Image: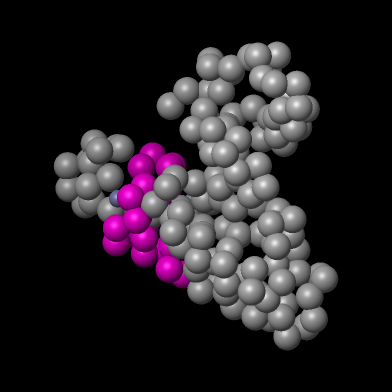
Amino acid sequence: MHAIYEFLNISDLPENEQEPFEKWLKFSDGEYLQQWYDAWKAHPDKILRECFDGWNSLIDSAEKELLQIGVEYRHYRQIKQKLGGLRIYIDTQHLPEDAQKKAREIVEKFIKLAASTCEYCGADGILLSHSGCIRTICKNCDQKTFGTEEI
Ligand SMILES: [Zn+2]
């Protein structure tokens, strides 16, 4: 894992991309990874997912269900991994009350699904802690990432 700064000079970017990228770096204290920058460039209209790829299909489904009740990309505040769990923060104030309730239910449903899904590969996972780093992870990815012999 490398910091973006090791790969990228903002002035190397096309002019129309420099300002949004700078804002994005400030928002994140500049700690994002190159792969996330690439993902953002490919989908600048989507909220950045601050987690590994194993949760992507869950988040895709959550976004699809939320879109059906009126939660658009501009209503997302943050999607991330925190303490090993998926967090999806959205604005629902524009929705009628029943849709707000539905939105909470959808988010809760996918947070629950993510709690048993490996954040790295999408296989069945469990919550594990490695010296303060808490992740929902499967046995294979745990060995690959943290070098643990046994769970
Ligand atoms: Zn895995």
Q: Is residue 128 visible?
A: no
In the orientation shown, which residue stands out farthest toward the bottom? 98
* Apparent side of residue 96 relative to residue 121 in the rendered image (left or right): right
Residue 101 is situated, as x and y percent measured from the top left of the image, at 68, 81
Residue 44 is situated, as x and y percent measured from the top left of the image, at 65, 42
* Residue in the foreground of this view, choosing between 114 and 84: 114
Asked if residue 119 is among those painted magenta in the image, a careful observer would answer yes
Q: Is residue 133 above or below residue 74?
A: above
Query: Residue placed at 70% from the left, 67% from the top?
Result: 71
Query: Residue placed at 60% from the left, 59% from the top?
Result: 88
Tell me where the magenta segment starts and ends, as one range.
111-134
Residue 2 is situated, as x and y percent measured from the top left of the image, at 47, 23
Would you identify the image quadrant in which residue 68 lies? bottom right
In the orientation shown, which residue stands out farthest toward the right? 94
Query: Residue placed at 65% from the left, 80% from the top?
Result: 102
* Residue in the foreground of this view, choosing between 148 and 29: 29
Query: Residue placed at 51% from the left, 60% from the top?
Result: 60
Residue 120 is situated, as x and y percent measured from the top left of the image, at 36, 47
